[in-house]
Amino acid sequence: MLVFRSVVVLSATQIIAWGAMFMAVSVTAAEMAGDLGLNPSSVYLGPTVMLVAMALCSPSLAGFYARHGARQVLALGSLFAAPGLWLLAGAEGTLSYFAAWAILGMAGAATLTTSAHVFLNEVAGEGARRAIGAQMLAMALAPSLSWPATVYLEGLFGWRNTFVLYGAVMLLVCAPLHFFALPRTVAHANTPRSRTPQVSTRQQIARDRLVATLITAAVALNGFVTWGFQLVVIDLFRSFALPEYLAVGFGSAIGFVQLSARLFDFLGGNRWDGLTTGLVAAAIMPLALLALIFGNGAEWSIILFLVLYGLSSGAMSVSRATMPLVFFTSGQYASVMARLGLPLNLAFAAAPPFFSFILGTAGNWWALSFALLCSLGTLASMVTLERLRPAQR
């Protein structure tokens, strides 16, 4: 019952937090650009600043998880998000605008995704993978809920008052839910014990470092592709001379395929683990890209791409949160996830402008070829991780 309550609370607060702190700008960007005297591309640099700040702050949270537990980190992050949103609402120029996003990044490191997964690991123990999968399944609803809500609120109050309201929600709804509605847990000690039996301490440390490096490479390379295409996929389809309505329709369909992949993984229960999910996802992504490259934008190749790409990216989003549980103890999980935040969020921040630039200057072949190279790197890392899989306990 405690696990179910935790999943429900975190599903609600993560949808609110991601919607308020990151997704809302997709709706408000045009009005913000006019009021602040910025061009639209500069407005979208705000979320990039946020992701960089999240990346830089994430590793330092490992000690907080060990000493205080993820519940307090989540609550403090929610409290800290409120002034960031209020500063954004009152921004009058470039400096205050980007300062607000930097504050949101620091708050986001504490209250978005990673801390939620660390908490579920604390409360669910061996059932953490299924709990995390359920929470991520609910998170697929975030755009469907946050974008219409922001459209309605902006039309009613304007973008500035919308962010004032979102700040109040973070302060008065999310922070109390994190602090009072989540059950108290005992933070796991960051013990250096590996799940692999009968190895010396030196071998164990070297093995753990290799595993952590491979996981980092796999999720960062995959994240670079999935987040890079997330914002430019419609432009990618347009570059193949696809009609506007088809480009938008095909791009929108990817989200439903991603949701189905998450649902399938969740319904699978304990029949496979996060490493198996990640290996299959990593094998599918190159096939998706090759279909579009060799199909040269034919409708069949675009449909095949969006199905394979959606399945791969949806499954990999679950795998990167649960794969460390295959190799590390519950006590090590928080530290590993905190350190993963640095390369992963940097990849998320850099990917959209990079792929937008490549697509606009060099064309779709180069964009797809670079994505294919990254995907093959992900697959190589996952195959190596599979060979390092610890013996079943």
Image: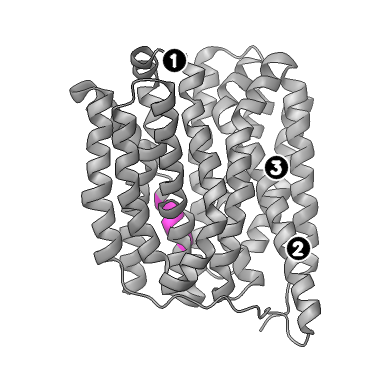
10 Å crowding of disc 1: few (<14), some (14-19), many (20+): some
- Magenta stretch bounds: 132-138
- Please identify the quadrant where the N terminus is shown: bottom left
User: Which numbered marker is on residue 285?
Assistant: 3
Main SS, magenta region, reads helix
User: Residue at horizontal 24%, vertical 66%?
Assistant: 180
Residue 126 in magenta stretch:
no
Which residue is denoted by mark 1 in the rendering?
38
Question: x and y percent of residue 295 in the render?
Answer: 75, 24
Tag 2: amino acid: Leu
**Residue visible at 77% across and 55% down in the picture:** 381
Describe the colour scheme in one phrase.
one colour
Taking the image as shown, residue 385 lies to the left or right of residue 63, namely: right
Q: Dot 2, how many residues are within 10 Å of its Cα: few (below 14), some (14-19), or many (20+)?
A: many
Secondary structure state at the residue bearing disc 1? loop
Q: Residue at x 51, y 27 (%)?
A: 45
Residue 221: x and y in percent read: 70, 44
Provide residue 199's location: percent of width, then percent of height.
79, 84
> Can residue 308 be seen in this snapshot?
no
Depth check, front residue: 114 or 312? 114
Q: Amino acid at mark 1?
A: Leu
Q: Which residue is mark 2?
A: 385
As drawn, the residue found furthest toward the front would be 95
- Mark 3 or mark 1: which is in front? 1
The answer, for residue 208, to whether it is visible in the render is yes
